[in-house]
Image (spheres, rainbow, N blue to C red):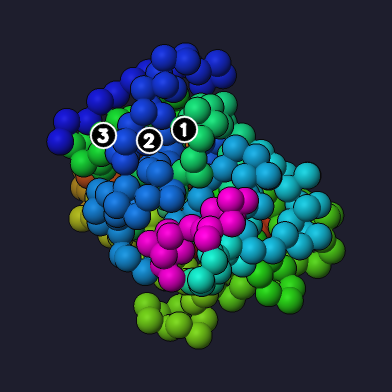
């Protein structure tokens, strides 16, 4: 299969580009498109054969359900069997935007012709669950594509299964070239981590995945929001641990770079010391650093000191290895800045040939929760 690439204006998408992409969706094909969170890989969410192509292209496990992307709350209601008060207030406040709601799935009634108002999502979308994931993205390209196709679009992140989510069209190309029909290149995805997933199908709202809408923002609307055990950074969940994992998407190995990633815990000074010690003790390793702006100068200095010492003593033994790559992801007081960069930074470290990536942790407030959830998953919970 040859993948086509069409550049599209992210603010004012060209109607011709959207029409071509919508025709591919309508014809049962696959289109990668930008959203405000990450790039999605879309197909007609009501056509099981089209959705199947998403699973094949990504190498995604069948049991992992997909989000249906809609262009209005009205369209979402037709896919859900119930629309609780929480859905009304949350969609009024956060849609369009990076919030996915889990709701009871609408179903055709046996023995009755399909109710024209209901759009039952196929089993392959929901992985047979009696709930469905719904989101209305705010990116103009995503919205235009959904509207133009007239369909709910099933779309996971447009990466090979298990890899870091794509925030640029070139990340999509690296993972899926030759495996999908079309890529709409609309530049960088601004939020950088996926949508927040909130389960409204039970008695109490439950945060399944921290993301672009913070827990604090949700709580302003709903009051206290519980965080599912598996959504907490560093939660230890073994694959197959079905009691803890509400769906296979929360298995801990995820967003994985090729290198072995390790979270560095502690405050800024402790992190500096741990990274310095690690570099000194692992001189033979190709180590990359994913660090905050506040600490970055310390590692630059460390590298300088290392080379001075070598000049002075004439021997390299015991000096810290210079990192093969240092990704400065942003200020620790602005985790949304870090969120926008982490997935690209992990890919850059891989490209630099890193064997190990040391990743500084940040506080868990605001977008820090989503950032640390992704870092711990990338590290399969390894931490120093
Ligand atoms: O920001 C996003 O949400 C991006 C963009 C493209 O919209 N999409 C995305 O999709 O991150 P994906 O497939 O990579 O992640 C969707 C997550 C998976 O972990 C899946 O298990 C979960 O949503 N999910 C889908 N349906 C569910 C359901 N009925 N109950 C619980 N979790 C569900
Ligand atoms: Mg994904």
Residue 39 visible, this angle: yes
Residue 272 visible, this angle: no
Question: Residue 356: image x %, image y %?
Answer: 30, 55
Residue at (62, 45) in percent of width and height:
75
Is residue 316 rendered to the left or right of residue 74? left
Q: How many marks?
A: 3
Q: Which residues are magenta?
A: 113-128
Nearest the viewer among 71 and 208 is 71
Nearest the viewer among 142 and 171 is 142
Relative vertical location of residue 6 with respect to residue 74 in this rendering, above or below = above
Relative vertical location of residue 379 with respect to residue 130 in this rendering, above or below = above
Is residue 310 rendered to the left or right of residue 210? left
Residue at (42, 33) in percent of width and height:
33
* Disc 2: which residue: 26
Residue at (51, 72) in percent of width and height:
110
Element at label 2:
helix
Residue at (62, 59) in percent of width and height:
80
Q: Dot 1: within a 10 Å radius of its alpha carbon, few (fewer than 14), some, or many (20 or more) residues?
A: many
Question: Residue 293: image x %, image y %?
Answer: 56, 38
Tell me the tag on residue 20: none
* Disc 1: which residue: 149
| Rendered-image quadrant of the C terminus | bottom left
| Rendered image quadrant of residue 174 | top left
Nearest the viewer among 355 and 92 is 92
The Cα–Cα distance between marks 1 and 2, rounded to whole angstroms, is 6 Å
Whether tag 1 and tag 2 are in contact, CB under 8 A, the answer is yes
Q: Nearer the viewer, mark 3 or mark 1?
A: 1
* Disc 3: which residue: 181
| Rendered image quadrant of residue 4 | top left
Element at label 3:
loop
Question: Residue 276: image x %, image y %?
Answer: 42, 54
């Amino acid at each position: 299969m040859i993948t086509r690439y069409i550049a599209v204006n992210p603010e004012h998408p060209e109607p011709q580009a959207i029409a071509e992409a919508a025709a591919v969706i309508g014809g049962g094909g696959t289109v990668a498109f930008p959203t405000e969170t990450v790039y999605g890989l879309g197909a007609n969410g009501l056509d099981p054969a089209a959705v199947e192509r998403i699973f094949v292209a990504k190498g995604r496990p069948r049991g992992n359900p997909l989000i249906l992307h809609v262009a209005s709350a009205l369209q979402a209601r037709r896919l859900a069997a119930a629309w609780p008060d929480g859905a009304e207030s949350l969609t009024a406040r956060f849609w369009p935007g990076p919030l996915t709601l889990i709701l009871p799935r609408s179903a055709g009634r046996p023995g009755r012709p399909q109710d024209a108002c209901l759009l039952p999502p196929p089993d392959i979308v929901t992985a047979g669950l009696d709930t469905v994931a719904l989101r209305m993205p705010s990116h103009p390209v995503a919205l235009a594509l959904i509207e133009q196709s007239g369909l709910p679009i099933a779309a996971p992140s447009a990466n090979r299964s298990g890899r870091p989510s794509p925030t640029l069209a070139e990340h999509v190309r690296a993972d899926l070239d030759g495996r999908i029909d079309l890529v709409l290149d609309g530049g960088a995805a601004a939020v950088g981590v996926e949508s927040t997933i909130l389960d409204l199908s039970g008695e109490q709202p439950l945060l399944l995945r921290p993301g672009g809408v913070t827990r604090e923002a949700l709580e302003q609307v709903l009051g206290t929001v519980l965080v599912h055990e598996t959504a907490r950074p560093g939660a230890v969940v073994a694959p197959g641990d079905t009691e803890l994992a509400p769906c296979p998407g929360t298995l801990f190995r995820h967003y994985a770079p090729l290198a072995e990633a390790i979270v560095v815990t502690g405050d800024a000074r402790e992190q500096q010391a741990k990274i310095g010690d690690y570099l000194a003790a692992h001189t033979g390793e190709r180590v990359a650093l994913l660090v905050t702006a506040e600490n970055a100068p310390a590692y630059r200095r460390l590298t300088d000191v290392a080379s001075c010492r070598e000049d002075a003593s004439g021997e390299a033994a015991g000096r810290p290895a210079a990192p093969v790559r240092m990704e400065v992801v942003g200020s620790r007081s602005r985790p949304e800045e870090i969120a926008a960069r982490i997935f690209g930074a992990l890919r850059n470290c891989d490209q630099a040939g890193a064997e190990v990536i040391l990743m500084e942790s940040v506080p868990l407030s605001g977008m820090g929760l989503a950032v640390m959830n992704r870092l711990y998953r990338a590290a399969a919970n390894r931490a120093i």
